[in-house]
Amino acid sequence: MTTNSLPPDPNNLWKPNRGLNKRVEQVVIGLFGLFALISVATTFGIVLSLLFETVEFFKDVPLWNFLTDRQWTPLFSNPQFGILVLLSATFLTSLIALLVAVPLGLLSAIYLSEYASPKLRKWLKPALEILAGVPTVVYGYFALLLVTPFLQIFIPQLGGFNALSAGIVMGIAITPLIASLSEDAIYAVPSALRDGSYALGLTKRETIFGVVLPAALSGIVASVILAVSRAVGETMIVALAAGQNPRLGLNPFVPVMTMTAYIVQVSLGDTPAGSIAFKSIFAVGMTLFLLTLVFNIISFWFVRKFRETYE
Amino acid sequence: MTSQSVSPVATEAALRAKNVSVYYGSTLAVRDVNLDIFKNEITAFIGPSGCGKSTLLRCFNRTNDLIPGARVEGKAMFHGTDLYAKDIDPVYVRRRIGMVFQKPNPFTKSIYENIAFAARINGYKGDMDELVENSLRRAALWDEVKDKLRQSGLSLSGGQQQRLCIARTIAIEPEVILMDEPCSALDPISTLQIEELMKELESRYTIVIVTHNMQQASRISDRTAFFNAEATESGNKVGYLVEYGDTEKIFNDPSEQATQDYVSGRFG
């Protein structure tokens, strides 16, 4: 024992095994740290592998051409790689998805947290979250085989593959994400704030829209931004239902090709490794990664900046 | 009740509880309260925890309606009108009978909007800047915030937040202000400011305050109601009104032994 340790316990019935305790403690810290490191290292690995192939790609295709070309023709003898083409399709499908998911998700969140009885809420919320558990390939076929033929009744010029039904179904797929996260944000608004509003002679609707939603704004916006990055990265639905036609423009009725759909197409095809088309999927993947990273950073920043601190 | 009233104008009962009992679910919380609260007076509700004083207070502007399972029996009346009558809209009740809560609860809006928001929704058509300034002046907060009206109400100190909550309540010009332990989360200096403020507001409003602080009750109130709680066979506590009268009498010469014990600090 060192000189500055506590005097021995006079009661000798207590003999804890301090030495072993200390060792177990160290092993636990080391083990948990290792697992934490694995997940971080994996992320780094992915970024690095993307980066190397992307650098290779940009040795063949100048970055300027990648950003400004208006054609995406990787398999032509004189290939062109204008990312704007794929970006426009991703933008279009994500926009349609958000137009569906934001009102749907937000209104369900408001209903769940403010209007539904506790009993109904107990059933409804898990039911809504089941929607998030449906495999996206199922959504893809849902869009292709059900939604598209249905929409064609009203829009005869709608293609068999199109951005519209892919976007709508993708919106349904990300609705639970917005609903669930926004509901958490709304539910977390202290009831004292609601009481304060009621005590001023405000109705329930005035209270919700005037007091509760502004207080939950940061959480709601964060949920929408997360949904955006989900939509941008969504693959199966657009690969199945939106088509494989790289086309610049924002026409929702024709087949388009999103960034993710392109990656799927090249990965499934017989493109030889090392070819320019093969390398291009890493450049697209990198673009996708940067895009979702930016969205996540914005969401993180927004929550930090606008989160209200209640006492 | 003694005949010599503390305040000479206090003749009319603004609020009246007639055999009021409140249940939460099947549990009785307050039993059979009868009392009159007079206009332009400060009435204090005192008593140990769980004696139902806050519960009774919440009856008077129907904030109990917001608690699932709460039920009021008997009559809570405002100038002779039963507040729980079928055709009475609780929203309108709360518009006339305002409330300030235990913990300051400013909205997540600017100081200006904290006051203007409810006034606008309630259809105020006058000059909003003027209303905000007057309300803040009457709540003795104007000088401290006049240069930062656009800042968040949450950026203020606890005592300032509570005065902001009082300002937004008086902005919509209620007749009665119910205060549920408004100083319990505040330091002594802020408490003193709120007490001074209440004395100034007394001429225009009827104020009912629930407080755990007996000095506070004796300092500011004209009348005091002492509540106590007793255990039932099932182990629940039921609150009831022990004694109600002029504050001076309650604190110096109460008729009930329990009141005497409580105000002299022997229990509670």
Image (cartoon, coloured by chain):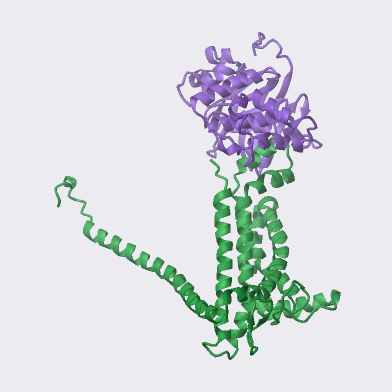
Q: Is residue B254 above or below residue A79?
A: above
Residue sitting at x 55%, y 15%: B254
Q: Which residue is at the far top?
A: B4
Left or right, A241 with reference to B231 = right
Give the image quarter of residue B65.
top right
Left or right, B123 with reference to B2 = right
Pick the residue in front: A153 or B245.
A153
Give the image quarter of residue B163.
top right
Pinpoint residue A28: horizontal percent, then vertical percent. Answer: 33, 63
Would you say residue B258 is visible in this rendering?
A: no
Q: What color was chain A assigned in the picture?
A: green
Pinpoint residue A122: horizontal percent, then vertical percent. Answer: 63, 58
Would you say residue B148 is visible in this rendering?
A: yes
Q: Is residue B51 above or below residue A271?
A: above
Disc tally is 0
Q: Is residue A84 above or below residue B240?
A: below
Left or right, B51 with reference to B84 = left
Pinpoint residue A75: horizontal percent, then vertical percent. Answer: 63, 88
Pick the residue in front: A27 or A47.
A47
Pinpoint residue A289: horizontal percent, then vertical percent. Answer: 55, 70
Pick the residue in front: A134 or A238.
A238
Residue sitting at x 53%, y 30%: B184
Q: What color was chain B assigned in the picture?
A: purple
